[in-house]
């Protein structure tokens, strides 16, 4: 009887968040798909049904194709470098007996800065006329460099995007590493494992499920990248740094075509789900339970 | 503590009397709220005049509280704000917003107040309006309710042209760029002197596109969506870009940064609009003139882009509910005294005002507008925003030779036609 009541209360407590998520996430998702089937502009009350026309146009839209390509490049680099750097840093900090709190705080810090602020920071660094990098070059008596060009723009935005979230994954991985019982490390030490071998054969396999979650988070996060890129380059020049998030914004708010923007939004959601599922399948391994 | 019945009744009576009194008091001092949306934010050059105008209105109508919902034009924030407000039945009581293509979705809702009746009724006020200015805000189209009606009242007009730092031209013995050959010569000389010839942004190339297309196609070509002269105009921008006329970072620089290059004399020329006059640091040595006609161009040398691209709108519903206060507010804002305050900063007036103490820069802008044979509204008032955005953002492909102007315009035309379906 008591259990029945407890279950009832649990459901009541879960209900408000379910309603909020239902309205602001799931309803919004379905509404986005619904609007993508319409010619809807200027946030008008009037829209006309056009079926899959918006989706057909995606294949002819050079900017969208570039945005997809750039998002995938960003994704690849984010997975490799955000998780790679975070893993290396966490493995090193995990070996420290003192001072690890200092590194944890330092590396986590960029995560708490807003994307717009980071974007502005890098925008001011890259600026041709009064940017930090060119000021340093001028001090050294060198010629000013045009940092953002069609060839370099994507790399220019990749750096802050990666830098921003390394700390986030670093903390997650470090927390997972702390869960590994000391006795396993001690056993490895007795067996004469080097730090490198210990990382590869003990630490990484033992935290593999956490790394898999991190990969899924990176994939989802990359499809949401907007603020940093928008502030630094706005997706330009010549769509060189255009990503799906910035292109959606341009179509919806500058182009005032909300129907087509909804189609882009639907593609973002769809790709995010598909790729996360693929990542989960690829990274699926038997879970290792720590036993001291 | 306990109350006896009579005591309790007395207490209730006292509370009721107090409540009644406070209600009367609040009615006596009641303020009427007026929600006003403009783009006169802190960064807008007209912001000081707007604040002063609001203060003067409050002096005249102390019971009116103005809820100032100013939204910047940057990133099209005001477009999104106004259009979503109208779509969600949350339209402001009064707003100062773009006219032309941007007005159409608002008029479709049927919520916009038409001014014709008031203009007829109050001749003393309406006679101040320049009749030609009112034509810019008279709707002509398929929405029957508004066809031939004045849906917004213009106050500040604008022009676009070539701003020239005259002192730099004098320093390097250059003739003012009244002709194409003088223009290209100035580009090459200024470049050789390490002066940026044209402070222009390819990223935010609104004014470059409009002025070059007008120069190439004349008013007829400019005002005909996707006329062949549009391609010529874009190709001339490319030609000027190839001459190295723009800043090195023209593909990424924003318009306000480009303006700063001109203001600080790092650049010799700038293609921009009358709103820049307020920001000029040297108003004595700045000349504003039409962009010279490109070789083979159809424009008359005095043809310019300009007009009245914004106006005061009133909500039909709010005006009825607030007993004409929104209309009164706009009449106050369009009075010659108030308009003079705005125009003293920049722009040209839509009403008859006495302008004194104009700077040489502002005067040259006025002269340019007064002498204009034709004044054309910008391209973005003629085609759907998405198509214009495609042209604007695609210009970087054209100037760098990655894509032809013809191809870009073909895609933009497709977008425009798709939107009309």
Image: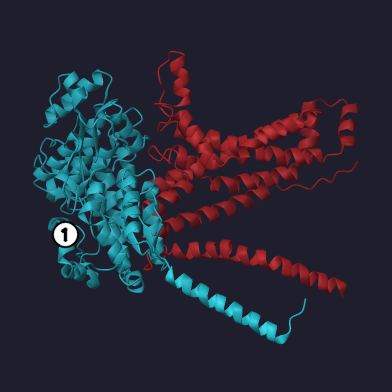
Q: Position of residue B254 (x, y in %)?
A: 36, 37
Residue extending furthest top? A141
Q: Is residue A77 visible?
A: no
Q: As displayed, is residue A182 above or below residue A128?
A: below
Q: As displayed, is residue B338 above or below residue B106?
A: above
Q: Colour of chain A?
A: red
Residue drawn where x is 67% and y is 40% of the image: A169
Q: Is residue A282 left or right of residue B377?
A: right
Q: Is residue B406 visible?
A: yes
Q: Is residue A42 left or right of residue B273?
A: right
Residue drawn where x is 12% and y is 50% of the image: B220
> In the rendered image, which quarter is residue B400 located in?
top left
Camera-nearest residue between A225 and B26: B26
Q: Is residue A165 left or right of residue A173?
A: left
Q: Position of residue B71 (x, y in %)?
A: 39, 52
Residue drawn where x is 48% and y is 29% of the image: A125
Q: Position of residue A156 (x, y in %)?
A: 49, 32
Camera-nearest residue between A22 and B416: A22
The C terminus of chain B, quarter of image: bottom left
The local crowd at label 1, few if under 14, some if 14 to 19, many if 20 or more residues have their Cα within 10 Å, is some
Which residue corresponds to mark 1?
Answer: B135
Q: As displayed, is residue A66 above or below residue B190?
A: below
Q: Chain letter of disc 1?
A: B
Q: Position of residue B136 (x, y in %)?
A: 19, 57
Q: Secondary structure at mark 1?
A: helix
Residue drawn where x is 33% and y is 41% of the image: B204
Camera-nearest residue between B232 and B318: B318
Q: Colour of chain B?
A: cyan
Q: Is residue B183 left or right of residue A20?
A: left
């Amino acid at each position: 009887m008591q259990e029945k009541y407890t279950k009832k209360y649990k459901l009541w407590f879960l209900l408000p968040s379910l309603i909020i998520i239902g309205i602001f996430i799931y309803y919004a998702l379905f509404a986005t798909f619904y609007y993508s089937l319409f010619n809807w502009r200027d946030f008008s009350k009037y829209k006309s049904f056009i079926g899959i026309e918006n989706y057909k146009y995606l294949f002819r839209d050079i900017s969208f194709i570039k945005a997809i390509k750039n998002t995938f490049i960003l994704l690849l680099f984010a997975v490799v470098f955000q998780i790679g750097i975070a893993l290396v840093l966490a493995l090193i900090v995990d070996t420290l007996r003192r001072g690890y709190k200092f590194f944890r705080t330092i590396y986590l810090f960029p995560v708490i800065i807003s994307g717009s602020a980071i974007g502005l920071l890098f925008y001011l660094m890259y600026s041709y006329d009064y940017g930090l990098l060119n000021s340093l070059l001028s001090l050294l008596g060198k010629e000013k460099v045009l940092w953002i060009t069609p060839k370099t723009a994507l790399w220019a935005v990749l750096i802050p995007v990666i830098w921003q979230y390394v700390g986030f994954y670093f903390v997650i991985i470090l927390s997972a590493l702390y869960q590994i019982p000391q006795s396993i490390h001690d056993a490895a030490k007795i067996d004469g494992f080097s730090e490198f071998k210990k990382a590869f054969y003990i630490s990484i396999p033992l935290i593999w499920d956490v790394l898999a979650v991190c990969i899924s988070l990176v994939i989802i996060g990359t499809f949401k990248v907007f603020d940093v890129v928008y502030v630094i380059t706005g997706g330009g020049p010549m769509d060189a740094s255009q990503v799906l998030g910035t292109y959606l914004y341009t179509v919806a708010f500058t182009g005032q075509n909300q129907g087509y923007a909804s189609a882009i939004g639907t593609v973002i959601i769809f790709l995010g789900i598909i790729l996360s599922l693929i990542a989960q399948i690829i990274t699926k391994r038997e879970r290792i339970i720590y036993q001291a | 503590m306990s109350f006896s019945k009579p005591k309790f009744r007395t207490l209730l009576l006292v509370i009721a009397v107090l409540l009644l009194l406070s209600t009367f008091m609040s009615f006596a001092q009641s303020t009427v709220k007026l929600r006003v949306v403009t783009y006169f934010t802190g960064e807008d050059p007209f912001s000081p005049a707007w604040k002063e105008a609001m203060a003067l209105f409050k002096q005249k109508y102390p019971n009116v509280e103005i809820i100032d919902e100013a939204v910047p034009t940057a990133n099209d924030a005001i477009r999104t704000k106004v259009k979503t407000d109208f779509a969600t039945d949350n339209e402001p009581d009064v707003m100062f917003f773009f006219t032309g293509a941007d007005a159409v979705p608002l008029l479709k809702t049927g919520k916009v107040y038409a001014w014709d009746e008031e203009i007829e009724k109050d001749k003393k006020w309406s006679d101040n309006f320049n009749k030609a200015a009112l034509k810019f805000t008279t709707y002509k189209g398929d929405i029957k309710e508004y066809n031939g009606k004045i849906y917004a009242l213009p106050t500040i007009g604008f022009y676009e042209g070539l701003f020239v730092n005259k002192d730099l031209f004098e320093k390097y013995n250059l003739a003012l760029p009244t002709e194409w050959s003088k223009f290209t010569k100035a580009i090459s000389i200024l470049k050789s002197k390490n002066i940026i010839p044209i402070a222009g942004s390819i990223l935010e190339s609104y004014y470059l596109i409009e002025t070059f297309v007008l120069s190439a196609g004349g008013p007829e070509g400019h005002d005909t969506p996707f006329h062949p002269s549009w391609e010529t105009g874009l190709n001339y921008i490319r030609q000027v870009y190839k001459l190295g006329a723009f800043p090195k970072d023209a593909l990424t620089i924003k318009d306000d940064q480009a303006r700063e290059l001109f203001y600080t004399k790092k650049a010799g020329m700038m293609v921009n609009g009358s709103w820049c006059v307020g920001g000029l640091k040297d108003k004595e040595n700045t000349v504003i003139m039409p962009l010279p006609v490109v070789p083979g161009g159809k424009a008359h040398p005095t043809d310019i882009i300009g007009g009245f691209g914004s106006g005061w709108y009133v909500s039909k519903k709010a005006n009825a509910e607030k007993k004409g206060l929104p209309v009164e507010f706009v009449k106050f804002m369009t009075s010659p005294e108030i308009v003079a305050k705005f125009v003293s900063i920049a722009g040209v007036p839509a009403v008859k005002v006495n302008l004194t103490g104009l700077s040489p820069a502002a005067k040259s802008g006025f002269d340019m507008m007064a002498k204009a044979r034709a004044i054309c509204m910008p391209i973005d008032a003629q085609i759907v925003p998405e198509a214009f955005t495609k042209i604007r953002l695609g210009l970087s492909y054209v100037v760098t030779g990655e894509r032809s102007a013809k191809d870009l315009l073909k895609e933009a035309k497709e977008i425009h036609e798709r939107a009309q379906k």
